[in-house]
Amino acid sequence: MAGRLRVLRKQNRLSLEALAEQVGVTKSYLSKVERGISDPSISTALKLAHALNVDVGRLFSDEVEPELVTVVRAGERTPVGSGAGSGVSRYEGIATGLSGKRMVPFVMYPPIESADSPFKSHTGEEFFFVHAGTAVLEFPERSVELGPGDSVYFNSALPHRCRSTGAEPAEILVVIHDDPDGSSERVPTLP
């Protein structure tokens, strides 16, 4: 139960203190339960399950739950958006069936031509890894050329857009970190 409880608590974005308060136990006691030092009473286990929005059986199960580990094979990626037209990026979602995740992974095939493509920005942080092809990641004040194996990590509040520069669209793994606290909302400046 120890490891499972910690994972479920973090999946629900609850601090140790917040969950302890909801359940009516001390933070110290809950920490001991998460570390396997103490076993909760049935009453406490029921309260934990309720606070975590799960069936109490999930707290005690030895099975790895599908929503805690998700495998997506190359042919099982989920097409995201229309992706129609030569100036539009095509996207394939990864782990789209997993709920409560803080990272949003997908594969992007940026267009070769994007002359009038608008810059986009949003909260959080973003990571690009070029798997195949070449591309350029454009910011208002700077452009970064990327080739196979190159990566870039940046604050998503900074306006950005991407386009392929080779004969074929590049294949880029993109991971966006959702920032529920909004700490990435301020727009940074590039050096």
Image (tube, grey):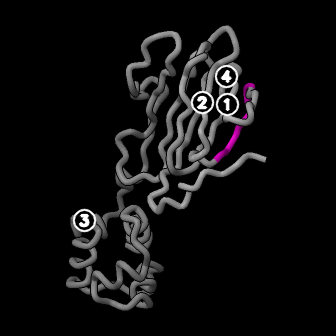
Q: Quadrant of the N terminus?
A: bottom left
Q: Marks 2 and 4, how far apart in space?
A: 18 Å
Q: Amino acid at mark 2?
A: Arg
Is residue 62 placed above or below 69 in the rendered structure? Answer: below
**Which residue is located at x 53 percent, y 14 percent?**
87
- Point out the tag, 1 or 3, that comes first from the N-terminus: 3
Residue 157 pos. (x, y %): 57, 47
**Which residue is located at x 57 percent, y 17 percent?**
111
User: Residue 138 shows which numbered tag?
Assistant: 1
Give the extent of the magenta segment: 147-154
Residue 122 pos. (x, y %): 50, 45
Which residue is tagged 2? 161
User: Residue 49 shows which numbered tag?
Assistant: none
Residue 52 placement, left or right of 188: left
Mark 1 residue element: strand
Residue 171 placement, left or right of 152: left
CB under 8 Å between callouts 2 and 1? yes
